[in-house]
Amino acid sequence: MISDSPPERIQKVLARAGVGSRRQIEAWIKEGRIKINGKLAVLGDHISSKDKVKVNNRVIDLGDADEE
C-alpha cells in the first residue's frame, strides 16, 4: 500500500489500482478527467494515500494500489 511510502506519480498508482493503463491515465489527465483533492490533475502530479482522487467524478480507493 502507498500509506507509508513517499508520494508516487498518479499514473503509476492508478494503473496499479487497476483503473487503466499508464498511457490511458495520461490521456485522461490531459482531458481533465482526473482530480486530486478537488483540483484538476496535471502530468507529473504525485499522490499519497492522504489524497482524494476522482476519475470521471468517481472516487478511487487508493487502498487497491498495493505494491507488488
Image: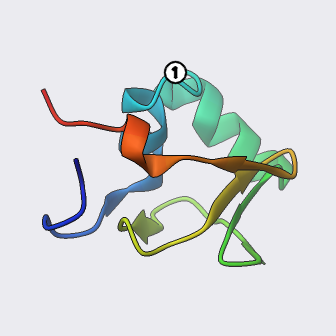
Which residue carries the number 1 mark? 21
Rendered view: 44 above or below 55: below
Rendered view: 51 above or below 67: below
* Residue nearer the viewer, 8 or 59: 59
* Residue nearer the viewer, 42 or 46: 46
- The residue lying at 66 percent from left, 78 percent from top is 37
Label 1 neighbour load within 10 Å: few <14, some 14-19, many 20+: some
Q: Position of residue 27 (x, y in %)?
A: 70, 36
Q: Quadrant of the C terminus?
A: top left
Write down the quadrant of residue 63 in the picture: top left
Q: Amino acid at mark 1?
A: Ser
Q: Position of residue 6 (x, y in %)?
A: 17, 70
Q: Position of residue 41 (x, y in %)?
A: 66, 66
Q: Secondary structure at mark 1?
A: loop
Q: Is residue 4 left or right of residue 14?
A: left
- The residue lying at 58 percent from left, 23 percent from top is 20
Is the image coloured rainbow, by chain, by secondary structure, or in one colour?
Answer: rainbow
Task: Tell me how many marks there are.
Answer: 1
- The residue lying at 35 percent from left, 38 percent from top is 65
Write down the quadrant of residue 46 in the picture: bottom left
